[in-house]
Image: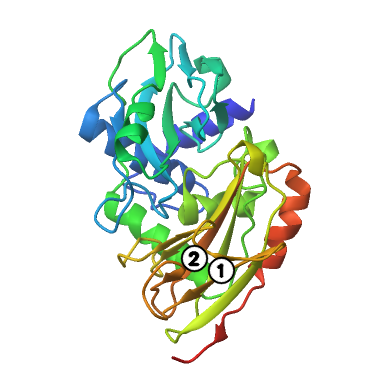
Amino acid sequence: MEKLLILISMLTSVSAYAAIPITKENYVTAESDWYFSGVQKKAGVNTWMHDDPVSKNNQQVIRSNRDVVYSIAIVDVSEGATFTVPKSDEFQLIHVIDEAHLFHQVVLNGESLHVTANDIVGEYVYLLGRTRDNGDLQNTKARQAKLKFDAKANRPYPAKDFEENEVVAFREMLVVEMNSGKVKVEGHNAFGKTLKDVDPHNYLYAAAYGWGGLPMTTAQYVAVQVKSSECQSWTMPKADLNWENNGFMSATFYGSDGWIKEDDFYISHFAMEKSKDTFSFTTNCVKGPGNATVESGGNFLVRMYLPNDPSAVKKTADVIRSMKGVGKGQ
């Protein structure tokens, strides 16, 4: 019944689109269609696009992640498809997302997953492969190329014909509401398998703020606002992650609209100042490792991968969410 209601909403939005503007009720479908249609235009169906490391000039999705290189595809699962990640000593996964920005199944190192249309909303899935960039680009790209899928059908994705400008405008409106502090969003119940697994408020705003985010059992995200362009220091607690098996933390910095604006936009936990229980970094100070440039009104996203205990990491996220920069002067 849930799938039927979502499909009816999707079809109604398309058939009556000329008379019905994008609303909070159909926005997530429209946003997802924006991403699916973008891949369709670039590569068609059932074709990997193995991307290079994220940079200011190379970002495919809002709030892109510099920790990994992305592999992107849309796949026709109407007759079934199998997704496989090879065994590796480096962090790697395939994230499977349906047309309603649900499902959110994760295939990890050495695993396979079979998906049919009965498992999802719609008949196509969006794949976000993530392969850890270990600093050796040739090695990273070789591991990236080993991601696999086997699909039994290969039909073009039928775009839902939402007006692109309206999708972008609605997205930006929701992002402004979040950045202004008018609304609060938590990521732990924004990305779920079905509508029963998500909070409607977080589900809506997370689609604007970070479409394609991983479920909390695999990764957790914390957005922090930067309210000053002055030199500041920041200290955050070290999360309880599976550090021995490729768990990691990072901070990636974005403009107020969620897109990368600067060349020095990323700090991994390896580059941060460490103590037993904390990581520290700076913003808008002397350029170099451990510092990022970010405009006033911008923000950064802390990523915490492979929680040992998702509930414990959520508590860490709550602490990070309340962080404030401390002015250092120069």
Question: In this rendering, is residue 37 above or below 108?
Answer: below
Within 10 Å of disc 2 (Cα), the crowding (few <14, some 14-19, many 20+) is many
The disc at residue 224 is 1
Residue 161 relative to residue 129: left or right: left
The amino acid type, in three-letter code, at marker 1 is Val
Which residue is at a point 49% across and 75% down the rendered structure image? Answer: 282
Question: In this rendering, is residue 166 above or below 253?
Answer: above
Question: In this rendering, is residue 45 above or below 168?
Answer: above
In this view, the residue farthest toward the bottom is 329
Q: Secondary structure at mark 1?
A: strand
Where in the figure is residue 78, as x and y percent of width and height?
A: 43, 13
Mark 2 — residue?
Answer: 300
Q: Secondary structure at mark 2?
A: strand
In this figure, which colouring scheme has been used for the structure?
rainbow
Where in the figure is residue 228, as x and y percent of width and height?
A: 47, 84
Where in the figure is residue 260, as x and y percent of width and height?
A: 34, 62
The amino acid type, in three-letter code, at marker 2 is Phe
- Contact between marks 2 and 1 (CB within 8 A): the answer is yes
The quarter of the rendered structure image containing the C terminus is bottom left
